[in-house]
Image: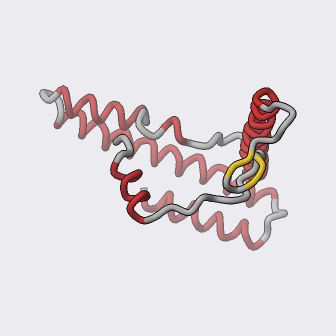
Amino acid sequence: CQKARTEARRAQRKMAKDPNNSELCELYGEKCVDKAIIIDKTRNRYYDGKLATAKNDPKKTHRIINHLLDKEFGANKLPNDTDDSAIAQKFSSFFNEKVQSIYTNIDKTNQENSTNQPVFTECGPSVSSLSCFKEISVEELMDLAMNLPD
């Protein structure tokens, strides 16, 4: 195990010095595959031992299997086949579309509910942006916070 890891690191350092050398690239690729195989074998032995110790405990066995299947954290992972900038662009587009949708719905609601005369509030005519706030006291804020649902 240790020898294979050392050889893979050595090949990686050599390749970093001369990235255009195809022979070094091939050697590095082979060492990476060897390293992955060693990691898989070690992981398998580790979990075989864990499952053997939890043999008569269904709760422990279930917990180990869920961890192996990554059920708890699997849904929160980012896709591996897309580069970071594409993921960031997708996130940006998604949230921009959400904000635009909210603004559009607010404007539609205001248009549907409005008559020919604007609705006046303490801040002035009603608009679809948060341009002013009504001042509240500390007591009112505490009362609001205490009445929030859990």
Q: Is residue 112 left or right of residue 123?
A: right
Q: Nearer the viewer, residue 1 or 57?
A: 57
Residue 120 appears at what percent x and percent y?
Answer: 74, 47
Give the colour scheme of this rendering. Answer: secondary structure
| Residue 54 percent coordinates (x, y) | 18, 34
The residue sitting at the left extreme is 56
Q: Is residue 98 above or below residue 141?
A: above
Q: Residue drawn at (70%, 56%), measured in percent from left and top?
A: 123
Q: Residue at x 63, y 59 (%)?
A: 133
Q: How many marks?
A: 0
> 46 or 35: nearer the eye?
46
Tell me which residue sits at (79%, 69%) in the image.
18
Q: Nearer the viewer, residue 51 or 82?
A: 82
Q: Nearer the viewer, residue 67 or 30?
A: 67
Q: Is residue 8 left or right of residue 70?
A: right
What residue occupies the far right of the structure in this picture?
A: 116
Q: Where the N terminus falls, by quadrant?
A: bottom left
Q: Quadrant of the C terminus?
A: top left
**Residue positioned 42% across, 65% down in the render:** 138
The picture places residue 143, in percent across and down from the top left corner, at 37, 53
**Outermost bottom residue:** 17
Horizontal side, residue 3 vs residue 15: left or right: left
Query: Residue 111 lies in what quarter of the image?
Result: top right
